[in-house]
Image (cartoon, rainbow, N blue to C red):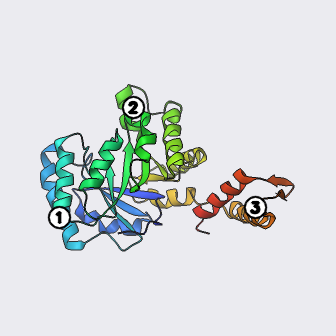
Amino acid sequence: MASPRSKLTSLLFTPGTRPDRFAKAVSSGADGIIIDLEDAVPAPEKDRVRGEVIAWLQANQRVGKPPFISAVRVNCLRNAYGQADLDALNAAALRCDAVALPKVESAAEVQQAVGKLFGQPRIVCLIETVLGVRLAHEIAAASPQVAALAFGGFDLSAETGGEPTWEALLWPRTQVVHACAAAGVPALDQPYLEFGDETGLAVECARVRSLGFSGKLAIYPKQCPVIQAAFLPAAAQVEQARLIVAAYEAARGHVSSVDGRMIDVPMYRSAQRVLERAGA
């Protein structure tokens, strides 16, 4: 299994129908791959593709070497395909680093997956429905194996009949971030669909990072370096964070300051997070 400290800044969706692309994901700059058995696979092909993906993983053990994350997105557990995916992964005794659960709407779904899956994989819960957003706090805290919540605004917009604009999705995005913060797990944002627009991707990464997201899902290999760079603190931020942490710890909880600004507990914690993101 991947180390619990494996990064979750960018995870690259790769269709289960394209095993020729699995190994290529390692050189994309992503922190891991999510082999997709859900949206990328038409219903008539799901049984066949599931079997082929499992056979590939049995033969190769994983995609890339740790800390690169080798994950599978199963189908929604509220339908027969999702249940069949869980049963097949369990029967094959595959040690996936992570399993992504789409359209999660309850803590019970997470617990069902945890109870069935072999090897205690990390669980990435996709929050893509109105009920999922409403119960995001319960889902994030459903199991110690929950490694992240991932926001999915396109399915959510289809359900509500709204448009997937920044303004329309700001509230549900914020709910997911808050649920993750309360549970102590990372929040990942939805993919950016305009895969040729690297500038637009970088802008959206900056906006969701300001909300508290710690990473973003990708659908195209060239998006991964953009995502990684966007969530990496600038050198000036890292240096300022070092000064804040050093000043606060040297003061042992007493009042301290950096560059004329008083340092308190929230500023100290924020500085620690900057250093964590920077790998410092």
Mark 2 and mark 3: span between their CA atoms?
40 Å
Residue labelled with disc 3: 244
Q: Is residue 157 left or right of residue 95?
A: right
Q: Are marks 1 and 2 in contact (CB under 8 Å)?
A: no
Q: Name which of mark 2 and mark 3 comes first in the sequence.
A: 2
What is the crowding at mark 1: few (fewer than 14 residues within 10 Å), some, or many (at least 20)?
some
Residue at 39% over, 63% down = 32
Residue 194 in view here: no
Indicate the position of residue 127 as horizontal and vertical percent values. Answer: 39, 41
Residue at 52% over, 44% down = 177
Residue labelled with disc 1: 92
Mark 1 and mark 2: span between their CA atoms?
34 Å
Q: Name which residue type carries label 2.
A: Val
Total numbered labels:
3
Question: Is disc 2 placed on a helix, strand or loop?
Answer: helix
Tell which of 137 and 207 is nearer to you: 137
Question: Is disc 3 placed on a helix, strand or loop?
Answer: helix
Mark 3 and mark 1: span between their CA atoms?
50 Å
* Rendered position, 73 above or below 236: above
Q: Is residue 276 left or right of residue 89?
A: right
